[in-house]
Image (cartoon, rainbow, N blue to C red):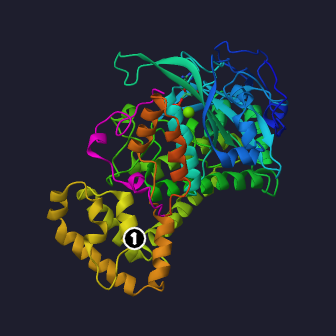
Amino acid sequence: MHVVDTLPAPRFDNRFVRELPGDAETGPRRRQVEGALWSAVAPTPVAAPQLIAHSAEMAGALGFDAAAVASPAFAEVFGGNALLPGMQPFATNYGGHQFGYWAGQLGDGRAISLGEAVAADGRRWELQLKGAGPTPYSRTADGRAVLRSSVREFLCSEAMHHLGIPTTRALSLVATGESVVRDMFYDGNAAPEPGAIVCRVAPSFIRFGHFELPYARGDVALLRRLADFTIDRDFPHLAGQGEARDAAWFAEVCERTARMVAGWMRVGFVHGVMNTDNMSILGLTIDYGPYGWIDDYDPDWTPNTTDAQGRRYRFGWQPRIAHWNLVRLAQALSPLFADAAPLQAGLDRYAAVYAACDRETIAAKLGFATCTDADVELMQRLHGLLQAGEVDMTLFFRGLADLDSQAPSLDVVAGAFYDDAKGERLRAEFDSWLRRYAARLADDALSADQRQARMRAANPRYVLRNYLAQQAIDRAAAGDTGAIGELLDVMRHPHDDQPGREAFAARRPDWARTRAGCSMLSCSS
Ligand code: AMP
Ligand code: MG
């Protein structure tokens, strides 16, 4: 593939392919790959790559200035038609548990890593194209991605980052100029849609499933090599040796996973497909597919129509599913340990850190200096009311920051109710909750100003509601790609009031309640 040397490119140091065993065969022939963690495979060129959005922060971190981003060569590279000097494209080999069941080899079926860039500040960023064509892991699929799902991944990666929640990032969104055929609801109505490619970026794309596959195949030597590599490259701060170091590593994975999920629960994010192949070893939110954001507070809600039956990945179950996934990881790592105690200790760490984060979230969302047992109960009671009253989670907590604790009134959250009749019926319960809350505030160490600042920093004003992303997709599909940049710009400062941008903080409009892409999403992407 042709190499462009006209762009100021970062330096590449491709440790994954240099230090870990690769597949002897190159190219995209679909197959089972044994004894190897990656296969060399180049992106398949596209007809007319055109950059339609990018993250200025991520471009800057990688050393691409505005002129570089605007040049045709940038779209060529990040559309999969050319490489930068030092890039070595590859797809990785992993397995996973999907919806509770072992699925065997999965792998990067439509993700191709270009290489590991080392930024000027020394940070390592792997660059990975999603939708760049077939790999040995594509199974029966085409290796491509459609515009709608690429817009969603691009926007949400950056939005999560700006919310302070660990996530993979997105550098660019390139339209391919080609169409991709998808059956959006698996109902026999396949249709061509515009194709696109996201370049996502992370220090590491290693997943739980990378460890599960060699474990399932009994390849302990490969498992050992991968664990050593991961600790060395992605957890270099871990001291110690042998089993003590491995135990510290697993405990840190558990801790990071707990912090990530606690972040999701704080802002109302539902991942939608928490399969173990979609769990990052660094505790980053990864693989933005049929994710969604809570509008009316409902712990039983899942955006994923593919999961509509069991609703395994519903909002309220995310903490326990993350734990279930960590148990699968612990099992995969078990050949590296003489007994189960260190692994159990890691899982216990998950529970302890999650519980601590949950209390921190309660204190921050309600504006208390610290969280007591009674506060936990107060929050549970509120959650029950929000669900019964069909109340918008984001608007309610944001509005609550404006409460005058001397004269508490539901007026500050009036706009958060989706169904006035339901709100009216629960009026007395809400009022009594509010009185209890106001009394609790009177007892708290924080001043009113401190409380408001704490609440605003924990309760975003702007989240990437499903309908907002869908509006940007509709406009982009009609040729107005500026909508994506505009929405990204709002999501850059989610906790700030942004005068003139009130529309982006509006609750879900009625038309979006049942519309595809707004309330229902499938894995078809
Ligand atoms: P996901 O549900 O997106 O996490 O994907 C599960 C598996 O299916 C992963 O191995 C993906 O690489 C693969 N996959 C999903 N979509 C495609 C596609 N269009 N082409 C090839 N592989 C795909
Ligand atoms: Mg995946």
Q: Amino acid at mark 1?
A: Val
Q: In this view of the protein, can residue 407 be seen by the observer?
A: yes
Near mark 1 (Cα within 10 A), the count class, few <14, some 14-19 or many ≥20, is: some
Left or right: where 92 falls relative to 285: right
Residue at screen point 56% across, 62% down = 353
State ligand 1's quadrant: top right
Q: Quadrant of residue 402?
A: bottom left
Q: Of all residues shown, which one is farthest toward the top?
A: 29
Residue 455 place in picture, x, y as percent: 46, 70
Left or right: where 234 falls relative to 100: right
**In this rendering, is residue 184 above or below 355?**
above
Which image quadrant: the N terminus?
top right
**In this rendering, is residue 219 above or below 167?**
above
Task: Choose between 338 and 4: the one closer to the eye.
Answer: 4
Magenta region includes residue 503:
yes
Residue 505 place in picture, x, y as percent: 40, 55
Left or right: where 174 falls relative to 117: left
Name the residue that disc number 1 marks.
376
Magenta region includes residue 55:
no
Residue at screen point 31% across, 41% down = 512
Q: Which residues are magenta?
A: 497-525
Residue 302 place in picture, x, y as percent: 37, 42
Figure disc tally: 1
Q: In this view of the protein, can residue 359 be seen by the observer?
A: no
Magenta stretch secondary structure, dominant: loop
Residue 388 place in picture, x, y as percent: 23, 58
Task: Choose between 473 and 161: the one closer to the eye.
Answer: 473
Residue at screen point 28% across, 83% down = 407
Left or right: where 171 falls relative to 145: right
Residue at screen point 40% across, 41% down = 312
